[in-house]
Amino acid sequence: MIRTGWGSDTFAIETGQAIVNPAHCSAPDAYMAAISDPGYKTHYAAALLAFSTGKNLTVIVSDTECTGGRPRIIGLHVQK
């Protein structure tokens, strides 16, 4: 699932699996990125590509930072 922000330029990804939360974020119900995060536009494009084509997606998160209380997306891998 891809969720978009409520009044902010953010998106979140839910994978249907347990959320990895190495930064101990306060609301670990999804992985999140905000427009102020490095790579936001590229991450959003990759998430939409994976979602629209049904490709597998691996989410890479920061070990130390959260966005909106959720694990911050720092990379996405779209599998062929």
Image (cartoon, rainbow, N blue to C red):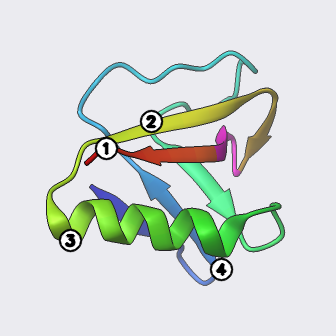
Relative vertical location of residue 58 with respect to residue 8 in this rendering, above or below: above
CA separation, marks 3 and 4? 23 Å
The boundaries of the magenta stretch are 68-74
Residue at numbered disc 4? 8
Q: In this view of the protein, which residue sits in the foreground, 19 or 49?
A: 49
For residue 79, which numbered disc appears in the image?
1
Q: Locate residue 30, reporting x and y percent.
A: 46, 41
Residue 9 position in % (x across, y down): 64, 80
State the separation of the CA atoms marked 1 and 3.
13 Å
Provide the major secondary structure of the magenta segment.
strand
Q: Residue at x 58, y 51 (%)?
A: 32
**How packed is label 4: few (under 14 Cα within 10 Å), some, or many (20 or more)?**
few
Mark 3 secondary-structure assignment: helix
Question: Three-letter amino acid code at disc 1?
Answer: Gln
Inspect the magenta stretch and tell me whether residue 3 lies in it. no
Discs 3, 4 touching: Cβ within 8 Å: no
Q: Amino acid at mark 3?
A: Ser
Instruction: Write the residue at 52% across / 47% down.
Output: 76
Q: Which residue is mark 3?
A: 52
Which numbered disc flags the more N-terminal residue, 1 or 4? 4
The first of marks 1 and 3 along the sequence is: 3
Position of the N terminus, as image quadrant, is: bottom left
- Identify the residue shown where x is 52% and y is 19%: 20
Dot 4 amino acid type: Ser
Q: Which residue is mark 2?
A: 29
Say which label, 2 or 1, has the lower sequence index.
2
Residue density around tag 3, few if under 14, some if 14–19, many if 20 or more, within 10 Å: few
Which of the two discs, 1 and 4, sits closer to the camera?
1
Q: Are the two marked residues, 3 and 2, in contact with CB atoms closer than 8 angstroms?
A: no
Pick the residue in front: 77 or 73: 77
Say which of marks 2 and 1 sits in front: 1
Judge whether 45 appears above or below 31 on screen: below
